[in-house]
Image (cartoon, helix red, strand yellow):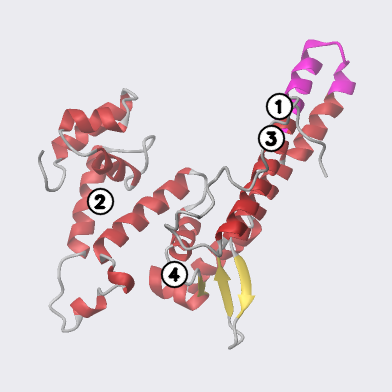
Amino acid sequence: MPGGRLSQQERQQIALGLADDLPYAEIARRLDRPTSTITREVMRNGGPNAYRADLAHRATARRAHRRRPSSTPGATAALAQPHGRDAEALAEYEEVFTTVLMASGLNKMASRVLTCLFTTDAGSLTASQLAQRLQVSPASISKAIAFLEGQSLVRRERDDRRRDRYLVDDELFYQATIASARANDQLVETARQGVAVLGAHTPAAARLENIARFLDFISESIVRAAEQAREVLHSQRATPLGDPTRPGPDDGQPAGSPTLSGQSGQPASRS
């Protein structure tokens, strides 16, 4: 199996494979490369819908240039990471994570800030620390934080030095998921208003009613799943990772309890 960096020709083959909707594993097999290599290459260079071979090749060259060893004394020490982490591997992972967040709909700076918070052991940083780590202006951090707070993806708190710190935790994921599910409520209500306007027995009204039922069911399922996942995570916090007694994703639900869709296949009534 060949090693080393991907060539420009290999990147062109990746682009062709993506255009043909080939899975990463098949592209990797044709290039005799690990699937993880192809996945990382695509996700750090725009994702499957935006990958361009020539742009990816130039971007990789720029990253390699930035990572050239410095002759400055103490440069090696500056690369030291806690817990024996590989600094280059971490930087590559952060790029991939940022790209995935961007593909989910976040803008680039919000994605970079969120990635930085996720990969920080403390799970929290001040605005100045974020600006320093990401090498951007405080204004850029402020704008990204305002957006993330509006989406319930970060939380603000004051530390003992009365500085604002921005953090991520398990509870924020729960709150963001609930907010996303509830965002459908207005669309459901509006669709059902249209049923009365268009006439209950018309094709257009039937279409709107089906949309309302679908979104209502999805919202109820998401809320129920989020609440169950929250209970499981709370039960895991006191158990170290890797402990065989640590509850799994199916634990925390009593035996014989209904599935997410309920025993009758209908969503439970909303609280």
Bounds of the magenta segment:
195-215
Q: What amino acid is found at the position of numbered circle 1 in the picture?
A: Phe
Check the image and report above or below for 87 versus 153: below
Q: Earlier in the sequence, mark 2 or mark 3?
A: 2
Quadrant of residue 157 within the rendered picture? bottom right
Mark number displayed over residue 214: 1
What is the quadrant of the C terminus in the image? top right
The amino acid on which the numbered mark 2 sits, given as a three-letter code, is Ala
User: Of circles 1 and 2, which is in front?
Assistant: 1
Find residue 185 and report its image quarter: top right
Task: Tell me the SS state at disc 3.
Answer: loop
For the N terminus, the image quarter is top left
Real-space Cα separation, disc 2 to disc 4, in angstroms:
29 Å
The residue to which callout 2 is attached is 59
Q: Secondary structure at mark 2?
A: helix
Residue marked by disc 4:
121
Res 50 quadrant in image: top left
Q: Which mark is residue 256?
A: 3
